Each structure stands twice: as structure tokens, then as C-alpha cells.
Image (cartoon, grey):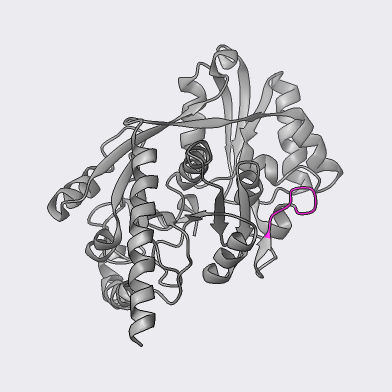
Amino acid sequence: MALDEAPPFWWRRHAWQAWAMSPLAWFYGRVSGRRMAAEPAASVAVPVICVGNFIAGGAGKTPVVQALAGHAAHAGFTPGILTRGYGGGIVAPTIVDPKRHDSRDVGDEPIAHAATATTVVSANRAAGARLLLDAGCDLIIMDDGFQSPNLAKDYSIAVVDAVRGLGNGFAHPAGPLRAPLSVQMARADVTLVMGTGSGADKAIRVCARHGKPVEHARVLIKGRTKLKGMKVLAYAGIGDPDKFFDSLEAAGADVVERRAFGDHHLYVEEEIRELLDAAKHAKVQLVTTTKDAARLAGLGKWHDRLFKASRVIEIELAFEDPAFPDRALRTAAKRAERRLAAEHLAEVAS
């Protein structure tokens, strides 16, 4: 469920709806917590870094995955990105090829990931990981899958949005948590707070109690100086459209109108006509995200028309501690060595 489609009470403290659903949340938390605590069903012979989050919906994982992949390539690794490909029709392990696949096949995020590193979509994460190994990758970065015991992980990063935070603190269906926070925190190696705000304060306090480190990062718009003073109609179908709109304003753009759609939204002709007409009438530039652009190009006459009329805003991630990505890579590599050695000894002993 996308954050903008989530029940409003998920983000309010002391909402009666959450307390009414608390028995269901307790049961869901017990089941999800046990599943998350289970031993991994499979492992692969390379380091595995997982980028996930504590709650349902977007928290900023995509730029983190791409930034880590870029750092890994610079450090001499051949990274591969593993994702389920939300919204795509392909479920079998498949290497994403933007020349053959579109968002209807593999989802929007994998199309964007494929520009950074070899990307595989797979409902079965272990099978997808093996396909990345066959493709020559020596490091796997998982986009989501933090709660899944399907594949052994060597380093897990839990991303928290600094504004939305953890919501009301309840698990599904009373709140946005995917499992009890204490269970999830035990499996996270670090919490990465995205942006600025007080929403992540609770997560930071829980990290302190568990002795887990906290890192910080923020998203910057590439070429932001060119946006200064530009009048734009911004539209986005992502987990948190307001974050995108606010970033445009922070870059100096004059956001005349905001159009927010659901996460992974598939635009229809009527919506496209409305966007094109509104921009023409107001004499402003249409702007959108790379994920939205992946759901436009090549999907039909009207989709192509909107794509060509829109300025696609690219982003980059700035870590507060520039050494963090390399530290994460080194830690994952060392842990993978120990994991593989232990697996070898167990195999010999049996």
C-alpha cells in the first residue's frame, strides 16, 4: 500500500481506529515478527546488502540503492540490483533490459535501476540473486526485502523518512509498521534518516536503546540552478509526492500547481490530456520524476506526448557522512566472508 493511499489515521497519534484494530495488529505483528526472525532459506556466495524500511510504502529507498550501486562500482565491485519489480507483470527471474521491457513488464523502479547497474526482477529473491551471479555480479543490493527470510543478508539498511517517520507506531492494519519495531530493529544494522524533520525522532531513540548507529542523507536535485524562477506544473505518482514538490521549491522553482497521484500510478489518457491542457493554459513547464517518466515513455501516443512535454527531474543522494557507503560495503564484504566460511565448515561437518 502506498503511503498516500494509506489510511490517514496511520499517521495520527491516539486515533480510535488504530486502537480498535490493535488486536489484529498484535496478531499480524506476531506472525510477521516470527517470519522475520526465521533463519534465511537460501544464501549466495557474494555480499548482500539490503535497503529496506520499517513501514509500508516509500521512504526513499530508490536513491539509496542507486547511490550504493554507484559507490560499489567505483570501489571495484560489479554490483547487481535485486527487486521484486512492483507493478510489473513479469514474476520469473529476469534481467531488466530497458530496450525490451517497460514499466508494464517490470515496474517503474527497475527501469530506473537498470541505468545504474545490472538489475533483476524476481518474486523469488534467492532465484533472482543467483541470476545476478550468473550475470557476473559480485555484490547484490536488494531494493526492499528487509522483512523477508528468503535470502541471507550481510548488511541491512533501514530507511526512515524524516517527516513521516514511523506513523502511529502500530503494525498492520492499525498502522504502517510491517512488523513490531523491536523485531525489525534487531535485524537492522543501521537506520538511515532521509531529509530533515522530527518524524524520525522515535526511530532514532529506539536505535539508541538497541545500540544501533544512525546515519543521515538528503536528496538533491541535479541541475537545480536551472530551475530557479521556472514556473512549473509538477506531477508525481510516487510514495510521497509532496517530498518531490517541496524539493522543487527548495531548488527555487515556482511550483504553480501540484498534481499528486498514487504510488506507481499508471496514467490514463484523460489524466494526460488534463495535465497537458493545464500546463498550456497556465503557460508553465511540466516536470516529473524519473519513476513517473518510466511509466510514460513507449506506452502509447498520449503517454509519449506527455513524456516529451515534461522535464524529467533527476536526483542525487548526499550522505552527511561521505564515508558511510564505503564503510557499508566493507562491512558487508567482511561479513560475507565469515558467513561463507561458517557455511563451508557446517557442510564439511555434515
| Image vertical order of residue 150 relative to residue 56, above or below | below
- Give whichever of 335, 59 is nearer the camera: 335
Q: The C terminus appears in which quarter of the rendering? A: bottom left
Q: Quadrant of residue 218?
A: top left
Question: Residue sitting at 65 percent across and 47 percent down?
Answer: 114
How far across and down, in percent of the image, does residue 231 sit? 62, 17
Q: Main secondary structure of the magenta part?
A: loop
Question: Residue sitting at 54 percent across and 19 percent down?
Answer: 224
How far across and down, in percent of the image, does residue 141 sit? 49, 53
Residue 340 seen in render? yes
| Image vertical order of residue 192 relative to residue 344, above or below | above
Task: Count the marks.
Answer: 0
Boundaries of the magenta span? 95-101
Question: Residue sitting at 35 percent across and 68 percent down?
Answer: 341
Residue 175 seen in render? no
How far across and down, in percent of the image, does residue 147 sit? 39, 66
| Image vertical order of residue 83 relative to residue 311, above or below | below
Q: Is residue 123 left or right of residue 92?
A: left
Q: Quadrant of residue 236?
A: top right
